């Protein structure tokens, strides 16, 4: 199986993570040779053996902990700070709740403060973004952790996020993140934890599901798709549902046979979008994103259709509901399958 070969060219900006992924692809059944060293967001990290006491920081992400779970690495987690409460894979909710939390509490910036991290004494701290190691927000720096004998790891595609001195390659990788980026992280974990065969099998399965949908819809006309999270209205300056565009959101929609209704916009569109822009958008298919377990997708869709009756989607009542499957993480295949069923039903 060569599932990782195509991944090494994207998402890592040509850094050490790409080399790790490429190596795994070249010898998919091989074992990791320790010490394993590579560059991670400009910092050299070295693993003498598979980490056994992992702290996963929050970073308002769930993709990292889900990747650990799907690789069967729960026993390596000392404490997990990521949770979401709703998932496109319902089994994930209970699996995440079952993980140890280490008794950790969040600071005002929604992550584990430095003193608690250092007191816990993990052997690896994982963050979805570089900002998880920012001293200005009360977090332990990567240098502090290294001085305490603790290795740190940032999801490679998010190196530029929260890193003022990010390289141009890191910025490009962040802007262009895709479904491949989600799979690259799985490949990286496979190498770090010496579960390469498991990682390759998982990547192969997830890629096959996405490619099956791509093949089915490849010759069909792309419909305009809007991903909106009503429960994330705090992200928009005008109190509107958070409309997701760019990067992995566009890639998930494209794989499902659509095109983002706000394609070409940067992530800033989520913050700046106004009601007139939303009302006049071409929307053939609405994708309602759930942020909390209390939200009901059908009810939220009805509210949006009532507020924006000129959408083609409102007239045809064409929608589906997702949660974490459109984010960076291992559940993209499920979201692609779900969205494709309303973009091109029966085709």
Image (spheres, rainbow, N blue to C red):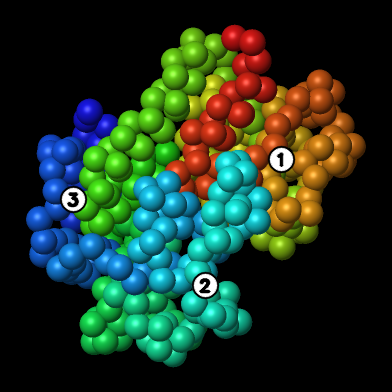
Badge 2 marks a residue whose secondary structure is loop
Q: Report how far apart the C-alphas of labels 3 and 2 lie in the structure.
A: 29 Å
| Disc number for residue 20 | 3
| Disc number for residue 101 | 2
Q: Name the quarter where the C terminus is drawn.
A: top right
What is the x, y in percent for residue 87? 61, 47
Count of numbered circles on the image: 3
What residue is disc 1 on? Answer: 288
> Who comes first in sequence, dot 1 or dot 2?
2
- Seen at 49% across and 21% down, the residue is 213
Q: Is residue 86 left or right of residue 186?
A: right
- 327 or 73: which is nearer to us? 73
Tell whether label 3 touches label 1 (CB within 8 Å): no
Q: Nearer the viewer, mark 3 or mark 2?
A: 2
What is the x, y in percent for residue 340? 59, 23
Q: Is residue 307 left or right of residue 318?
A: right
| Figure quadrant of residue 272 | bottom right
């Amino acid at each position: 199986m060569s599932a990782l070969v195509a991944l090494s060219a994207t998402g890592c900006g040509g850094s050490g993570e790409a080399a790790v992924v490429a190596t795994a692809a070249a010898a998919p059944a091989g074992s990791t040779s320790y010490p394993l060293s590579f560059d991670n967001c400009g910092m050299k990290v070295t693993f003498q053996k598979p980490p056994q006491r992992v702290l996963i920081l929050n970073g308002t992400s769930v993709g990292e902990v889900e990747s650990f779970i799907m690789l069967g690495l729960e026993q390596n987690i000392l404490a997990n700070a990521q949770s979401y409460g709703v998932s496109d894979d319902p089994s994930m909710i209970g699996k995440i709740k079952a993980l140890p939390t280490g008794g950790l509490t969040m600071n005002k910036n929604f992550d584990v403060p430095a003193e608690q991290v250092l007191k816990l004494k993990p052997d690896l701290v994982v963050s979805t973004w570089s900002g998880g190691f920012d001293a200005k927000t009360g977090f332990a720096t990567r240098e502090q952790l290294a001085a305490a004998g603790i290795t740190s790891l940032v999801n490679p595609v998010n190196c530029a996020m929260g890193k003022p001195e990010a390289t141009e390659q890191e910025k490009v990788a962040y802007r262009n993140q895709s479904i491949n980026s989600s799979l690259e992280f799985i490949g990286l974990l496979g190498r770090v934890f010496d579960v390469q065969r498991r990682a390759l099998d998982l990547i192969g399965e997830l890629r096959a599901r996405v490619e099956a949908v791509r093949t089915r819809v490849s010759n069909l006309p792309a419909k305009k798709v809007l991903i909106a999270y009503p429960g994330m209205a705090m992200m928009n300056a005008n109190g509107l549902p958070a409309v997701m565009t760019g990067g992995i959101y566009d890639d998930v929609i494209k794989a499902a046979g659509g095109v983002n209704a706000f394609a070409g916009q940067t992530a800033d569109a989520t913050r700046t979008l106004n009601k007139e822009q939303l009302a006049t958008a071409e929307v053939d298919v609405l994708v309602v994103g759930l942020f909390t377990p209390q939200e009901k997708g059908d009810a939220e869709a009805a509210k949006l259709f009532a507020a924006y009756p000129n959408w083609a989607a409102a007239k045809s009542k064409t929608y589906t509901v997702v949660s974490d499957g459109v984010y960076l993480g291992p559940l993209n295949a499920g979201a692609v399958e779900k969205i494709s069923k309303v973009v091109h039903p029966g085709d």
